[in-house]
Image (cartoon, rainbow, N blue to C red):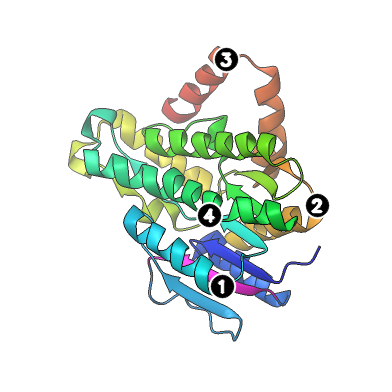
Amino acid sequence: MNIKTALVTGGSRGIGKGLSERLLDQGVVVYSVSRSTDQGISHKNFHPIQLDLSDLSAVQDFLSDFSSKQEIPDLLINNAGYGAFFEWARFSDQDLLDQTQVLFTAPAFFCKAFAPAMAERKSGVILNLSSLAVLYPLPYMPIYNAAKSALSSLTHSLMLEYEAFPRLIDFRMGDVRTSFNQSSLKQTLGTQTDKMKVAWDQIEKQLQDSPDPNIAAGQIIAAIFSGKRGTIYGGGFFQGRLAPFFAKLLPQNIISKILKDRYFF
């Protein structure tokens, strides 16, 4: 497989930074999209791009400008994302819109900008980073769960249309020990119920027991260069291997009970 150029969203930290570094090590020219002005990588083939994915007008302008000035990338990785931990009634309308746009609408715009040209060129890979939350939703993170499920569904829908190129990957990552929790929007502590606090503590514990971002980035890179398409799972052994297997065997009501017992004891 000949990947010379890559466009990575959320490339300034965590998994995205690990992806950028591994691609650079393989001689790939990387265009990294992030809200941050300082992405912490200095390399002749690294091109940082500041962009707020919640601003869809800015996203459209960027994609139009990029497509006119650069060649269609060989690889697109939709990685950017963040969490929001709220009771449903306390989700602000703006937070709901912003998170949906970053996690689903912006990635859909990126796919729309490049997938047709990749198909016409008969080469290219698009990897959409969804989540194990597609199968096992996280408590008090409804928009994250729903948007990642929508991104997964979009990937599989596009696979029906584009049978060969672009090669589409729905990468369902489990927990990874990143700054995800620290950067997540959270309901103020004083308004959190005891039930919420118990759930958050369990989510924190899961992250601490999870693989680090470099391992996760390595799994994603391996999937890209494996030639595989469709759904691929990543993370630790249980979440990356056993959890998907159990999801196929167990009825949804049993899975819901397991989740309630896990997060709320």
Q: Let me know if residue 12 appears in the view.
A: no
Residue 231 is marked as: none
Between circles 3 and 4, the one closer to the viewer is 4
Q: Nearer the N terminus, badge 1 or badge 4?
A: 1
In terms of secondary structure, where does tag 1 sit? loop
Q: Amino acid at mark 2?
A: Gly
The image's mark for residue 227 is 2
Q: Is residue 13 magenta?
A: no
Quarter of the image with the C terminus is: top left
| Secondary structure beneath label 4 | helix
The residue type indicated by label 1 comes to Gln
Vertical arrangement, residue 184 with respect to residue 172, above or below: below
Q: Is residue 33 magenta?
A: yes
- Asked whether 216 or 116 is in front, the reply is 116
Mark 4, residue position: 113
Q: Main secondary structure of the magenta part?
A: strand
> Between disc 1 and disc 2, whose residue precedes?
1
- Cβ–Cβ below 8 Å for labels 4 and 2? no
Residue denoted by label 3: 254
Badge number at residue 70: 1
